[in-house]
Amino acid sequence: MPRLAAALCLLAVGCSRCAKEPASPPRDRPHKVDAHTHFPPEATARVIALMDQYGLDAVVNLSGGTPGRGLEAQVAAAERYPGRIFVFANLDWRHTLLGPGYGERMAEDLIRAKAAGAKGLKIPKALGLAIQDAQGALLPVDDPGLDPVFDRAAELSMPVSIHVGDPVAFWLPPTPANERFDELSVHPGWSYFGESVPTWDELLGALERRIARHPKTTFISVHFGNAPEYPERVSELLDRYPNLYVDTAARVPEIGRYPAEKMRALFEKHQDRILFGTDLGVGVEPSQLMLGSTGATPPTRADADHFFRATWRYFETADRAFPHPTPIQGRWTIDGISLPGDVLEKVYGGNAQRLLGLR
Ligand SMILES: [Zn+2]
């Protein structure tokens, strides 16, 4: 837009055409599906507005709830915007407290979830870190009692997004020397240091056993395979398990500091099994917005613009040493990986569309 027209633009603040660096790319861009978002049904209209603003064609809402407890309302809200919102169901963990047979009962719920319109299943990090069995013992990620759930997901062609563990730094002392000190200062409860929980490595080991045990189940290991600190390890897992996918949600800051040429090669090698995701969280109130993480104060419009611009810049440019999307996650810069157009098309949306049965 010419400078004079931009100056006169009635939309002024926030008009993407006026910004020097548009927050949303032009219309000839690849189809974008954000495979990792969270929001309640009441926030759906707000999510659609954000999607239009930042150029997201579709999103997957991983906070779908369970049959009879929220799922139906989530699907109904999504259906008001055909093709734009896909819902993944959750599990009702109260089944574990009722004793043996919980996996079978949850697998039955999954049939109801599919019938209600859920496209997949999301398992939260609470599995392995907090969820207990009827005796009060921590349920491991590879607990055999849960096997029916993963087998049923395969039978129903429902991909399973699974969050296991958290950033490695959350297991280290939460001191100024911790690279996640800013985030841990705002959220002291996110630290596992000194807590009686499994180690990061034990959790990752249990996740691998879970993936290996269900070769017919499609796993989306979120947050870049739940191991963004170790891209080689993620790459090896992708080599070993053809049923494994990863998403990039909330981990561009982490993978962005890995050497760009190596990361670009990793994306090219596994171009059919990496899904773009943000971990965008949206509530009803304007202040309720999560851009990969949350800080001490609610994000501003400028924070949201920065979040999306830095995200596109990472995937699409070869720029070096620029600020990453989520400043609270750490004080470092990232390097763009300049993905080729065909790889970008798959990562941004094509792979998700395939998993969702849309192509
Ligand atoms: Zn998430």
Image (cartoon, helix red, strand yellow):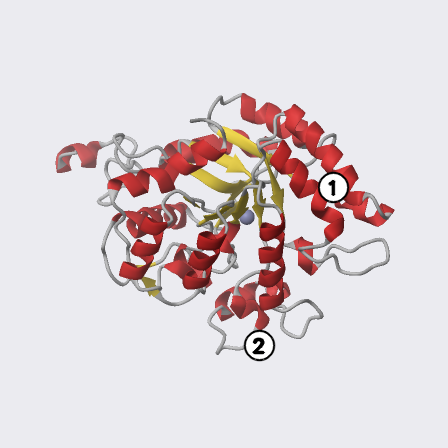
Above or below, comparing residue 146 to residue 179 in the picture:
above
x, y percentage for residue 42?
A: 60, 31
Q: Amino acid at mark 2?
A: Pro
Q: Residue at image x 70%, y 58%?
A: 140
Q: Is residue 163 above or below residue 28?
A: below
Question: Mark 2 sits on what residue?
Answer: 173
| Of residues 48 and 339, the one drawn nearer to the viewer in this rendering | 339
Question: Of helix, strand and loop, which one carries label 2?
Answer: loop
> Does the beta carbon at disc 2 come under 8 Å from ligand 1?
no
Q: Nearer the viewer, residue 298 or 240?
A: 240
Residue 145 percent location from the top left of the image: 76, 49
The kind of secondary structure element at disc 1 is loop
Decide which of 93, 78 is in the foreground and name it: 93
Q: Image quadrant of residue 108?
A: top right
Where does the N terminus fall, quadrant-wise? top left
Q: Which residue is mark 1?
A: 92
Q: Is residue 118 left or right of residue 260?
A: right
Relative to 179, is 31 on the left or the right?
left
- Numbered badge on residue 3: none
Q: Residues within 10 Å of mark 1 (few under 14, many from 20)?
A: some
Q: Is residue 13 above or below residue 138?
A: above
